[in-house]
Image (tube, rainbow, N blue to C red):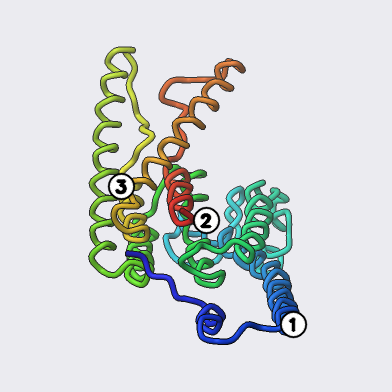
């Protein structure tokens, strides 16, 4: 059973006499002004979250801790002002990656949407820590095909707290165990299928789509969604992954750029999509 805190307005309407038209109009105007204020605040919130996601995605894969960001080309440390608003490294002139702009634009749009369509079981502000966390693991896995143990441990704690608040302890723990077992099963099946395909084609497979980091991801995502919704989250995520992979491979084949075992897509961002879908159902 999922918790949802009832709004004070609904409780009031259950026990109060009918409002006059002028009172309803005034109340509607107040709600509209609050929505507009939230929409305005979503812009700086999106910018700050985008900066935080970009920063953590830059430093965690290399240092595994909070540290001063460096240029990936010349390895010189960025000055704070140059890092925040600059587009090129002041030392070697290397441009920032396109990911910086994509993350900034994406977080601003997502924050704007969250003010209008927050997850049913949580409000706008409660959803922001999850946006930062899933944004960081999604970017890092997309760029490095890596789910860090540090982010996984943090995710276990974060999603455990959210899960207990949303579903109580038992469904949360069952969800974490279910996510672990399901992703572990897909991990083992993936390793076996890649080895069989490698033997059949006479090629050595050195990369797999489903890594052990994805097993950790399934665990903390299960804590967040709870049981049995983690089943739907993983299946939806994998379905989107398969469809996207087929389209991606088809494009590479058309361009004659496809290479077996060299074209590996990250799985965790698609699992995140499955979690988001389930949270809104």
Q: Please name the residue shown 35% across and 37% down the image.
A: 210
Mark 3 residue crowding within 10 angstroms, few (<14) / some (14–19) / many (20+): many
* Element on which disc 1 rests: helix
User: Which residue is under mark 1?
Assistant: 26
Place of residue 241 in the rendered image (x, y in percent of width and height, measured from the top left): 45, 36
Q: Which residue is mark 3?
A: 215
Instruction: Where is residue 246? Give x, y as percent.
Output: 49, 25
Dividing the image into 4 quarters, which one contains the N terminus? bottom left
How far across and down, in percent of the image, does residue 52 sit? 57, 65
Relative to 73, does residue 104 appear above or below in the rendering? below
Nearer to me, 57 or 10: 10
Residue in the picture at 44% in, 75% down: 5
Question: Of label 1 and label 3, which has the lower sequence position?
Answer: 1
Indicate the position of residue 88 as horizontal and vertical percent values: 72, 54
SS state under label 3:
helix
Is 206 positioned to the left or the right of 111 in the image?
left
Q: Is the residue marked by circle 1 packed among few (<14), some (14-19), or many (20+) residues within 10 Å?
A: few
Q: Residue under circle 2?
A: 135
Lower sequence index among marks 2 and 3: 2
Q: Secondary structure at mark 2?
A: helix
Q: Earlier in the sequence, mark 1 or mark 2?
A: 1
Query: Mark 1 or mark 3, which is nearer to you?
Result: 1
């Amino acid at each position: 059973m999922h918790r949802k805190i009832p709004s004070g307005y609904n409780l009031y309407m259950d026990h109060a006499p009918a409002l006059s038209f002028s009172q309803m109009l005034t109340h509607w105007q107040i709600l509209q002004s609050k929505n507009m204020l939230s929409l305005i605040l979503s812009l700086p919130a999106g910018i700050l979250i985008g900066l935080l996601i970009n920063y953590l995605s830059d430093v965690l894969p290399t240092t595994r801790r909070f540290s001063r960001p460096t240029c990936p080309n010349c390895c010189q440390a960025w000055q704070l002002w140059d890092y925040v608003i600059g587009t090129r490294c002041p030392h070697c002139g290397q441009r920032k990656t396109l990911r910086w702009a994509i993350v900034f634009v994406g977080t601003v749009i997502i924050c704007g949407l969250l003010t209008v369509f927050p997850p049913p079981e949580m409000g706008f502000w409660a959803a922001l820590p999850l946006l930062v966390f899933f944004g960081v693991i999604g970017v890092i896995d997309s760029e490095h095909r890596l789910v860090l143990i540090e982010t996984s441990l943090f995710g276990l704690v974060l999603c455990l707290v959210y899960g207990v608040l949303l579903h109580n302890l038992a469904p949360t723990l069952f969800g974490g165990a279910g996510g672990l077992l399901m992703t572990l099963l897909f991990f083992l099946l993936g390793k076996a299928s890649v080895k069989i395909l490698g033997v059949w084609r006479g090629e050595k497979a050195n990369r797999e789509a489903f890594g052990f980091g994805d097993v950790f991801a399934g665990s903390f995502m299960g804590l967040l969604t709870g049981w049995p919704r983690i089943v739907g989250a993983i299946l939806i995520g994998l379905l989107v992954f398969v469809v996207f992979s087929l389209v991606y491979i088809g494009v590479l084949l058309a361009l004659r750029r496809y290479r077996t075992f060299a074209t590996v897509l990250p799985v965790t961002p698609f699992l995140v999509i499955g979690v988001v879908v389930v949270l809104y159902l």
